[in-house]
């Protein structure tokens, strides 16, 4: 007798459904994005609200609540999403992002504009977040580790040209602009007008980039002339600038290759792992970056770190002398210390060019105590670099140092939000443990 055919329930994906579940009901009650939204609700976004022109009595549709856009980009940064188009798709299809939108339609252009349009607000939020953690006693500016990481720029290696090529392209761009201005504006329909406007905008932006490239090329030639003769290029004709992103530079990347990039600097507390300072430069080395970072931290919080941990690339007599005179003790290895030891020299002995401050720094770095403290640099600075890499900070899609700094600021805020949440949880756990011990001792 043949075996009976089993009865099965088959998928029917064409059947329509009517559901009355709200977005809030669909999202689990303990989902982390709920904490993110509560955090965003506490932020002071009055500076953004003041820029909105859609007010009673004026024409125009209502603007999107900036808290929604802020939460969307923080969540996207945490999830490693750096594209406004990808984020716009998530706002339509992903429950977490749909919940944040709460039924508000958000386009990719609005998301892109918001991400890079409020740098000063993001900078103030960073200061406020860190100040709040300091007020709660969760972190202190006792010891800070600084390090730089190379981030790929939105430009190709082939976009770097010599002055002769840039001058030729500049003349061609000017001719294109003049040709567009002289054209008769024939009304061939709305689509044609949009295409013409887009063409004019593209040509105008290219002309602006070429002007910026020529200006940066002049600066690079002057810097080349100021270099020691051994380090100087043979002539100015070898100096090149990018016509795509004139502010980026070719830098040595972690894999040993040279590509257009920016140098992102982070300063992080060794206790708590909170980023307290951030900067973006187009310098290929970390030399000269310690002093600006210490000044930035002092400007933000009215105090300097008591100790600064840096690698040997930051070391210079002038920077260490300035830091020590202003109350910051520097922990950084002397340059080529191991090489000097192999040659039988003492890298920690005073040099002829040393001041009292730098001589004290050299002697200090030769002690076991200083070497133990310096070990905290890697576990702090390198860890933060890895965290931002894990969130997608390998390259940027925007051009120009100011916009790159704003994009990096989103990664800083996302990182600090995670640290703030964890530090507060640890404090609550510690308070609960102490309360339990107190009850037991009283009993």
Image (spheres, rainbow, N blue to C red):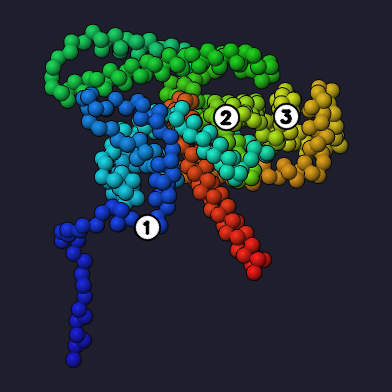
- Distance of label 1 from label 3 (alpha carbons): 48 Å
Q: Quadrant of the N terminus?
A: bottom left
Compare residues 349 and 19 and report the one nearer the observer.
Answer: 19
- Distance of label 1 from label 2 (alpha carbons): 37 Å
Do the residues under discs 1 and 3 have CB atoms within 8 angstroms? no
Q: Earlier in the sequence, mark 1 or mark 3?
A: 1
Q: Give the farthest residue toward the bottom.
A: 1
Compare residues 144 and 434 and report the one nearer the observer.
Answer: 434
Q: Position of residue 223 (x, y in %)?
A: 60, 16
Circle 1 sits on which residue?
29
Count residues near mark 1 (Cα–Cα under 10 Å), then give few for <14, some for 14-19, many for 20+. Answer: few
Q: Secondary structure at mark 2?
A: helix
Residue 327 got which mark? Answer: 3
Q: Is residue 126 above or below residue 196?
A: below
Q: Position of residue 19 (x, y in %)?
A: 20, 58
Q: Quadrant of residue 244?
A: top left
Q: Position of residue 414 (x, y in %)?
A: 47, 42
Q: Secondary structure at mark 3?
A: loop
Count residues near mark 2 (Cα–Cα under 10 Å), then give few for <14, some for 14-19, many for 20+. Answer: some
Q: Is residue 102 left or right of 4 when viewed as pictured?
A: right
Q: Is residue 203 left or right of 411 when viewed as pictured?
A: left
Q: Is residue 164 above or below residue 340?
A: above
Q: Earlier in the sequence, mark 3 or mark 2?
A: 2
Do the residues under discs 1 and 2 have CB atoms within 8 angstroms? no
Q: Residue at x 35, y 35 (%)?
A: 66
Residue 184 got which mark? Answer: none
Count residues near mark 3 (Cα–Cα under 10 Å), then give few for <14, some for 14-19, many for 20+. Answer: few
Q: Residue at x 14, y 14 (%)?
A: 186
Q: Position of residue 434 (x, y in %)?
A: 62, 59
Circle 2 sits on which residue?
300
């Amino acid at each position: 007798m043949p075996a009976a055919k089993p009865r099965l329930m088959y998928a029917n994906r064409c059947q329509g459904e009517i559901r009355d579940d709200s977005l809030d009901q669909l999202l689990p009650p303990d989902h982390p994005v709920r904490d993110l939204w509560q955090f965003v609700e506490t932020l002071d976004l009055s500076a953004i609200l003041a820029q909105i022109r859609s007010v009673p009595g004026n024409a125009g549709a209502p603007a999107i609540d900036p808290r929604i856009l802020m939460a969307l980009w923080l969540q996207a940064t945490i999830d490693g999403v750096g594209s406004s188009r990808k984020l716009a798709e998530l706002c339509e299809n992903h429950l977490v992002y749909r919940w944040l939108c709460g039924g508000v339609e958000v386009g990719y252009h609005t998301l892109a504009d918001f991400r890079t349009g409020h740098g000063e607000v993001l900078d103030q939020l960073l200061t406020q977040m860190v100040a709040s953690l300091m007020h709660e006693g969760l972190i202190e500016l006792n010891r800070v580790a600084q390090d730089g990481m190379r981030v790929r720029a939105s430009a190709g290696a082939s976009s770097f040209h010599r002055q002769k090529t840039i001058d030729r392209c500049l003349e061609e761009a000017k001719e294109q602009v003049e040709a567009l201005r002289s054209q008769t504006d024939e009304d061939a329909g709305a689509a044609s007008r949009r295409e013409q406007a887009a063409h004019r905008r593209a040509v105008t932006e290219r002309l602006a980039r070429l002007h910026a490239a020529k200006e940066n090329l002049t600066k690079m030639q002057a810097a080349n002339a100021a270099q020691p003769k051994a380090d100087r290029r043979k002539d100015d004709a070898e100096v090149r600038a990018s016509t795509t992103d004139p502010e980026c530079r070719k830098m040595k990347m972690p894999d040993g290759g040279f590509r257009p990039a920016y140098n992102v600097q982070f300063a992080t507390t060794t206790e708590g792992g909170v980023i307290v300072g951030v900067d973006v430069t187009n310098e290929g080395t970390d030399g000269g970056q310690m002093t600006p970072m210490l000044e930035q931290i002092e400007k933000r919080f009215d105090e300097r770190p008591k100790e600064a941990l840096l690698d040997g690339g930051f070391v210079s007599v002038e920077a260490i002398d300035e830091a020590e005179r202003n109350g910051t003790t520097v922990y950084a290895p002397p340059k080529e210390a191991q090489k000097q030891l192999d040659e039988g020299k003492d890298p920690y002995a005073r040099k002829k060019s040393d001041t009292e401050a730098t001589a004290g720094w050299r002697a200090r770095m030769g002690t076991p105590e200083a070497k133990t403290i310096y070990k905290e640099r890697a576990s702090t600075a390198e860890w933060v670099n890895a965290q931002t890499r894990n969130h997608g900070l390998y390259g940027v899609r925007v051009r120009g140092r100011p916009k790159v700094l704003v994009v990096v600021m989103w990664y800083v805020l996302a990182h600090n939000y995670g640290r703030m949440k964890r530090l507060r949880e640890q404090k609550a756990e510690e308070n609960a443990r102490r309360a339990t011990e107190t009850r037991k001792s009283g009993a």
